Each structure stands twice: as C-alpha cells, then as structure tokens.
Amino acid sequence: MADFQSLQDIESIKALKHKYFRCLDSKLWDDLAECFAEDAVTSFTDGAFQLQGRKSIIQFLRAGLGRETFFGIHHGHHPEIEIQNTNSATGIWSARFYMIDTQGSTGMHSGAIYYDEYVKVDGEWKISSTGYQSIFEETWDRGDIPSLELTKNMFAITSEVE
C-alpha cells in the first residue's frame, strides 16, 4: 500500500500534467515554462523533435503552436505514475489531440502515449523529460467539408471568427 506522501506526490504530478496541457492549449507560455525543470528534455512526435532545456522547449512550442490561427486541445488521461524516491517519479499517460489550423484550412486528430519523468525541485514537482509515441494520426482539409464552420475561437483577434 502506498504511503500518504506518495499519494500526495501522485496527485501533485497529476495536477502538474493537467497544468501542462491547459497552458499549452491556452498559449500561456510563461505558465507552461513553470511546468519544466531547467534542464528538461523532450522527444515530441515520435522523437522527431528532441529538445534540451526549458527555454528551448518553450521557444519550440511557441513557434509551432503560438499563431492565433492555430489551436487545439490536448487531453491526458489514465495516468500510471510511479514514485521512484522522494525526488523522482515516472509517468505514462494516454493522450488525444485535436488541432485546427484555420490559415492552412487543416485539421488533425491523434492519439498517443506520453512517457514522462519528473523531479522535485525546491519542493515542487517538475517535468524533467517528456515525449510521446503516436498511436494514430489523421488529418483532413477543412475546406473539403462544406458545412464545417468554426463558430468559436478564443484566440480570434476581433469578434469575428475566421
């Protein structure tokens, strides 16, 4: 049976990963940076994008996802978190992504498995390593669907939806 501290740590790590997804989708780059250890590493898109250091990770994510015309939602669920010791843990998460690029008129839906490592820094859990392996990915041209209409966009510059 897990001890009380381990259960608290697991809940803190869950909250950290939820914050990661929320900040990523909301384009809250400074808050997203707080999720990572200074020397964090990533392996996104089945290892195609390997980055080192919190600053490089945030710059990459901002460049790729920061446009007002590009947005999506990331859902992480079914966490399998193992506390290794008082300052390190691992996690495996199932994830689904739904992305829209109104500039390129494309959509994407995918499923993946995240593999994370966490480290406790000054009493707070941080992501020290994250990456995912795709299960599937499907894309489409949004222009091919005549009835498709984007009716809400929290990133729209004006009150009009693009």
Image: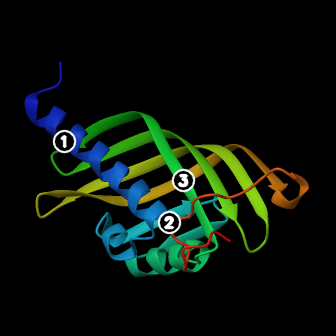
* Three-letter amino acid code of the residue under disc 2: Met
Tell me where residue 79 sits by quadrant.
top left
Name the quadrant containing residue 101: bottom right
Residue labelled with disc 3: 73
Q: Identify residue for label 1.
A: 9
Mark 1: secondary structure: helix
The residue positioned farthest toward the top in the image shown: 1
SS type, badge 3: strand
Q: Do the residues under discs 1 and 3 have CB atoms within 8 angstroms?
A: no
Of the numbered discs 3 and 2, the one sitting upstream in the chain is 3
Q: Amino acid at mark 1?
A: Asp
Q: Residue at x 82, y 50 (%)?
A: 147
Look at the image and tell me in which quarter the N terminus lies. top left
Residue at horizontal 50%, vertical 64%?
A: 42
Q: Nearer the viewer, residue 37 or 61?
A: 61
Quarter of the figure that contains the C terminus: bottom right
